[in-house]
Image (spheres, rainbow, N blue to C red):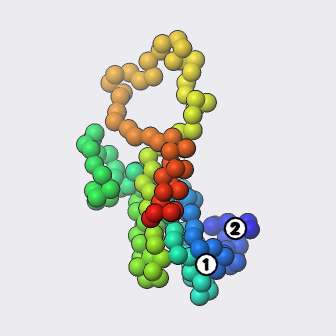
Amino acid sequence: MVADLDRPESLRRLAGLADGIIHCAPPPNAGEGDPRTRRLLAALALRGSLPRRIVYISTTGIYGDCGGAWLDETAPPRPATARARRRVAAEAMLRAFGQRTGCQVSLLRAPGIYDGAERLPLARLERGDPVLLAEDDVYTNHIHADDLAWLLALAWFRG
């Protein structure tokens, strides 16, 4: 089935089709809230057969710039960008949907995703050029796509 979260009419057939949903669509690049998640949840609620679980891939960007401080998922969101605020809005909509319907909602807050050597600056590394100047270095966090897929499977089966 082909559906487009930006075209509500394409979502009508979603309701009742699956026991679970993996939601990894990002919010739009502009605007307030996350209309894509809102449309998805509205479509899922059209029929009496709701999914039993939803796993949403959000972002660690909801924490804002933590200045290198260590934190975990219990830290309150402090989104510093409009895009991160849209992710926080999506998380809130999903939590509310779960509370209202009994659907189990799992949120995975993924950092920057990379997928392997093809994205590394190999020529630069082979020459020994610095990737960053010391004064440009920052704390950051990344996850390999395969590791995120493994965590997604764990969230799917264990919540």
Residue type, numbered disc 1: Ala
Which quadrant: the C terminus? bottom left
Crowd class of label 1 (few under 14; some 14 to 19; many from 20; radius 10 Å): many
Which quadrant: the N terminus? bottom right
Q: What residue lies at 48% left-to-right and 52% top-to-bottom?
A: 151
Q: What residue lies at 48% left-to-right and 13% top-to-bottom?
A: 128
Residue type, numbered disc 2: Ala
What is the count of numbered marks? 2
* Picture coordinates of residue 13, whole percent (x, y): 70, 78
Q: Is residue 102 above or below residue 145?
A: below
* Picture coordinates of residue 144, whole percent (x, y): 51, 40
- Look at mark 2 in the image and give the residue it sits on: 3
Q: Considering depth in this image, is 83 or 91 the residue closer to the camera?
A: 91
Q: Considering depth in this image, is 141 or 138 the residue closer to the camera?
A: 141
How far, Cα to Cα, is label 1 from label 2? 11 Å
CB under 8 Å between discs 1 and 2:
yes
Q: Which mark is residue 52?
A: none
- Look at mark 1 in the image and give the residue it sits on: 43
* Picture coordinates of residue 117, whole percent (x, y): 58, 29
Secondary structure of residue under mark 2: loop
Q: Is residue 39 visible from the viewing direction of this image?
A: no
